Structures are given as C-alpha cells and as structure tokens.
Image: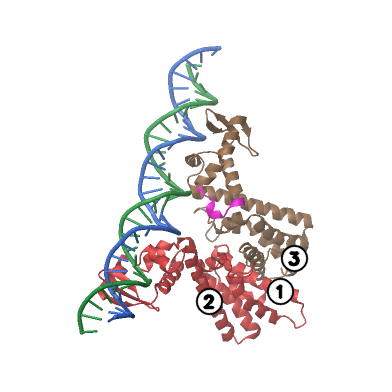
Chain colours: A red, B brown, C green, D blue
Amino acid sequence: LLAKRLGDVYTDNMTNNDNSVNIKKAGRTYHHGDLRSALIEAGLSLLQNCDADAVSLREVARMAGVSATAVYRHFPDKQALLYALCQRGVDQLAEAQRAAKAAAGGGTAGFDATGQTYVRFALANPALFRLMMTTQAPTGHFAPDETLVSSAMRELRQNIAEQLPPGAPDDQRRIAAIHAWSLVHGMAMLMLDGQIPRDEALIASISRSV
Amino acid sequence: LLAKRLGDVYTDNMTNNDNSVNIKKAGRTYHHGDLRSALIEAGLSLLQNCDADAVSLREVARMAGVSATAVYRHFPDKQALLYALCQRGVDQLAEAQRAAKAAAGGGTAGFDATGQTYVRFALANPALFRLMMTTQAPTGHFAPDETLVSSAMRELRQNIAEQLPPGAPDDQRRIAAIHAWSLVHGMAMLMLDGQIPRDEALIASISRSV
DNA sequence: TGTACATCAGTGAACGCGCGTTCACTGATGTAC
DNA sequence: TGTACATCAGTGAACGCGCGTTCACTGATGTAC
C-alpha cells in the first residue's frame, strides 16, 4: 500500500484503470475522476482477496490511497458503501448470466447455462456473492419482501417459467422457479463453505435436474 | 444480566436447567456442575437471539454470569467455544431429522420429511445454522475435504442413495444426494437471507422435487 | 491579465467502543496426617 | 476431630487492536471582476 502511494508520487500523474485520475501534488492525492468509483473498485478488489467482514471502511480507503474520512464525501456511511458494492455484484452476475444464455443459444440449453453461471460466479467471487445475498437494501429502495438480489432474479424467474408447459398454473411456475434457484444457490453455498467439492462435473450435473 | 446475577445472590443456591449448579458465596460464583456446559447453553441461547457475529467470548461469559477469563479454564480459545456450539447444532439437526424420518414411517415419506426438517431447523435456528455451515473443524478433526457438517450428512447421503433404483451407478447416487442437499440447503439459505418468503407451502413443495 | 474570493474534496487527530487474550492473583475446596 | 497444605476454578486489571465516526482544518481549484 505504501509502495503504491510512493509509486503515485514518482509518476506524479497517474491514470487508474477506471474513470478516475489521481494526481499527487505536494504529497497530497486528488481524485479528479470520482473517488467514488475508485472506492468501489477498491472494495471489489478487496472482496476478491478477503472475507466480507474484512472489508472495513478504513481498509477500502487505504486501498484507494486516501484517508478514511474522505469516504464520507461520497457515501453517507459504511453501509452505503457496501450497498454500492452489492449493486455492482448484482450487475456483474446478471450480465454474466445474460452472456451465458446468449452463448448457449437460448432455450433449454440457455437456461441450463444460466444456472451454471450462477454457481461459477459464486465460486469466482465468494465474498462478493455472500455480501450480495446477505445485504438488505436501505429502507425505501424496494417493496417489502423485495431485495436487490431478488429483484435482479425476476428475470431468472421468468426464464424458468418459460421452460414449463404453456398451460401450467402460476403457482407451479413460481415453485419451479424457486426450486431451480434453490438448487443452484444451495450448490453454490455448499461449495463455498467447503461442504461439497468444487467440482466442475457437479456444476454440469445441474442441467439434469432443473 | 446484572439482574440475573443479583437474583442468583438472593436465592443463594440456584440450579440451572442443565447439568450445572451455580453457588454464590461472598459475591462470587462457583459452578459445581460444569461451567463448560453452562457456557455452551449460554452460547446457544445467544445464537437464538442474535447474529452469529454477536456471539463474542465476552458476551457468552457475561450471559453465564462469569468473567471473560473464566472461559479459558474450559476452552483454549474462542474458536474452540464456537466449535463446541457447532457440534451441538449438528447433533440437534441430526436428531430432528432422525425423529422426522421415524415419524413419517421411513421410505419416501420419511426421506421427504428429512429434507423439510432441514429447512425448518434452519429457520428455527438461523444464526446457529449459519455458524454450523461456515465453521471449519480444527485441523486434524476430519479427513481433508471433510467437515463436521458434511460428516453428519453422510447418513443423509445414504438415505438419498436408498431412494434410487438398486442398479444405479455410484456416481449417479452421489450426484442425486448432492442435488437433494443443494435444494434444501438453497431454499433454507434463501429464506434466511430474505430472498424468498418463509412459506410453509414452499417447504412442503420440496417433496415433489427430490 | 492579475487578483480576491468562495467552494469543497481532501486531511490528521481524536472519540469511544468492544473485542480476544495475558497476567498475577485469590480463596473455597478436599485431602493427608 | 483439628490443622496444614496443594489444587485449581474463578477474579479484575491491563494489553493492544482495528473499527466507524466526528471534528475543525487546509489548500488547490475555478470564477467573477
């Protein structure tokens, strides 16, 4: 971390991979893109390497090369920062599923691919995935009993309903959707918790059950 | 908490619901049963009311009416205390499943009851359930890739295998077992995380899928 | 073009908190004589 | 039965830690004149 900051000083003008530019003058860091984005990137990269509970406001700030208090210019509190990370995670998962579905050519194969992508995303982003599932939206964001994740899953639910025969009753569609989600979610969590092996063959086996 | 301690003083000799007896003399607490059991009970009751991360060593000691350092007479460290709680949880879950299976009269109905009991246990003991799934055994307790939970699930896996036709290959049995576990585990976790409603009809719907 | 000034994204010091763990200790208990 | 003593389950004070958050501040920037 110190090395990174010193590096910034020596290059003097440095462009982040994202939409922010850090400029050091007189030993001070100015973020001319938005520090907000830099903080989110820092948080995501932290989630790649640590447990979710290691993502402290101070550590995120440290990784962004900024004092802890600077965070409060961009987020009202820690919870809001975490929530922003969740939103990014949900977007990434949705995008990955959309891509997998398209690559498989839609239909049943596309649907299977969606489920497998869900598990692979969880394995590739354990801490982020856990955070996404655990985090409740700030009050007022969603209808009661609706979460950031479950609203993102609405599309998934519709996919599942499509797999059923046209005449199927709504309740049956709803239950089928929840069973499919439960299966992939359960497999993902059991793998993350080390209860079952992280086995590609197991992930592939999903298609035989949904 | 203070009230409880004062209560102890007034009754002077007080029998816990468990296998320990607290005696107060000269303002001091002596546990003549084992404080170990009392600490575990305190931890379990704490898990009933709080998130798992609120179960601190100090709080458990407080609930048992004892100084934090007293814990170290009975557990090498906090991790060992948590692990003891997990063991109790695993036992409780296994016992509940055994009872449900017996009550349903074995066979397919018994197997379904096992899965539904899994979900109900999670809903009834959210923090304990999470802790059980997350906690890794101290090194040396189990074979690599084997956890306290997954070893307790060995019985479940055998149950599942029994439901398959006799000629089924081992690999198919293994996958069927994991799918069944994944389904109930996923439903339990999604309900705990508030992603799907805690709906008894959903729990009942499990029997149509395993 | 030069100057005065408001803005506002950063700063470091400080706060109180609860945590896990260590330490030297104390005093009730049970036992040996 | 009375006494000396070892045992060992408890005690409270103290440690260092990292946390989220507050506070008054500073100084580079862009703008108005």
For image coordinates 61% across by 75% down, the residue present is A153
Q: Is residue B50 magenta?
A: yes
Which residue lies under the disc numbered 1? A174
**What is the x, y in percent for residue C12?**
30, 59
Q: Chain of mark 2?
A: A
Distance Cα–Cα, label 2 vs label 1: 23 Å
Q: Is residue A73 left or right of residue A144?
A: left
- Residue picked out by circle 2: A91
Q: Residue A11 or B170: which is nearer the viewer?
A: A11
**Above or below B130: residue A207:** below
| Number of numbered tags placed on the structure image | 3
Q: Mark 1 is on which residue type?
A: Arg
Q: Earlier in the sequence, mark 2 or mark 1?
A: 2
Q: Residue furthest right?
A: B105
Q: Secondary structure at mark 2?
A: helix
Position of residue A129 measured from the top left corner of the image (x, y, whole percent): 53, 69
The answer to whether tags 2 and 3 share a subunit is: no
